[in-house]
Image: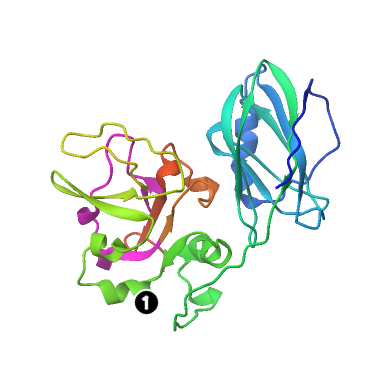
């Protein structure tokens, strides 16, 4: 990894490409940024041959800011509030790279050049029937797209879950290397067991042990909170249409990056109220 960092007063520059779909919600947040938050992060992302990499996502999840590299590997992220943030560089086929940067004072430009290494993705041998786009229920079209392009997440479809109909959700999730099932008063909860983000370890609701609990969404709505993880026993497997599990902010799509995304994210799509 090659990295160069400089700080200087912010200046207007040439336009850059903002082509990634997940940036659609960023515009409104940028417009609402206070005038004092004028920090800019810019730089170039290359591969190991020093050729510019296009389409690399640059994410500051806690600052709710992000950008995408252009055809020359250049990127710019504007309107960053003063503070210290985790910066994630990621692109399909390359190992994600994470750094921490502090943005001090009222204004400034920080330049960070990064080199990403190609990452071979070895998938397990699974015999499955691939359904065409027309066969995927409308409700989970975006889930199917993420399953195709996100190399870090773990995905279940209904054909796999139907074999789990007579098991409870904790048993379906048991055995995944980076998570663990924690028994607490009145239920079982899902927590990150190693790697992939910050360990909150804060006190939870009465009877719930302190741990880095995975953030749970159901049909796009966040159910868990910092103090109250979701009881997995309350979610019947036979109601689930599909699921997706991410271990860290670097893997998680920006639309699911809530306050506890550093501990992992589980998104569940149900057959209730959906368009099949």
Label 1: which secondary element: helix
Residue 139 visible to the viewer: no
Q: Is residue 44 above or below residue 7?
A: below
Q: In which quarter of the image is the C terminus?
A: bottom left
- Image coordinates of residue 169 in percent, x first then y, are 26, 61
- Image coordinates of residue 42 in percent, x first then y, are 75, 36
Q: Viewed as shown, does residue 265 lie left or right of 147?
A: left
What residue is pinned by disc 1? 159
Numbered marks: total: 1
Q: Please tell me which residue lies in front, 163 or 26.
A: 163
Q: Viewed as shown, does residue 269 lie left or right of 53?
A: left
Q: Residue at x 61, y 34 (%)?
A: 28
- Image coordinates of residue 130 in percent, x first then y, are 50, 80
The region drawn magenta spans: 216-243
Figure quadrant of residue 95: bottom right
Q: Please tell me which residue lies in front, 209 or 30.
A: 209
- Image coordinates of residue 234 in percent, x first then y, are 21, 54
């Amino acid at each position: 990894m090659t990295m160069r960092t400089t700080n200087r007063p912010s200046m207007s520059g040439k336009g850059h490409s903002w082509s990634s779909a997940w940036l659609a919600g960023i515009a409104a947040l940028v417009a609402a940024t206070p005038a004092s938050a004028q920090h800019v992060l810019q730089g170039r992302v290359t591969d190991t041959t020093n050729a510019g990499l296009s389409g690399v996502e640059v994410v500051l999840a806690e600052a709710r800011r992000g950008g995408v590299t252009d055809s020359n590997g250049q990127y710019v992220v504007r309107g960053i509030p003063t503070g210290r943030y985790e910066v994630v560089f990621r692109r399909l086929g390359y190992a994600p790279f994470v750094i921490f940067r502090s943005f001090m004072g009222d204004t400034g430009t920080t330049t960070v050049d990064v080199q990403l290494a190609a990452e071979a993705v070895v998938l397990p041998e699974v015999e499955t029937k691939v359904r065409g786009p027309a066969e995927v229920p409308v409700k989970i079209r975006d889930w199917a797209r993420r399953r195709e392009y996100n190399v870090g997440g773990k995905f279940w479809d209904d054909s796999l879950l139907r074999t789990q109909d007579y098991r409870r959700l904790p048993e379906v999730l048991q055995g995944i290397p980076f998570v663990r099932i924690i028994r607490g008063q009145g239920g079982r909860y899902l927590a990150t067991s190693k790697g992939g983000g910050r360990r909150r370890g804060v006190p939870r609701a009465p009877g719930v042990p302190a741990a880095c609990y995975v953030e749970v969404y159901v049909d796009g709505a966040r159910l868990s909170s910092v103090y109250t993880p979701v009881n997995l026993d309350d979610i019947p497997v036979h109601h689930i249409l599909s699921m997706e599990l991410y271990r860290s902010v670097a893997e998680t799509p920006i639309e699911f990056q809530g306050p506890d995304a550093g501990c992992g994210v589980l998104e569940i799509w149900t057959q209730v109220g959906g368009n099949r």
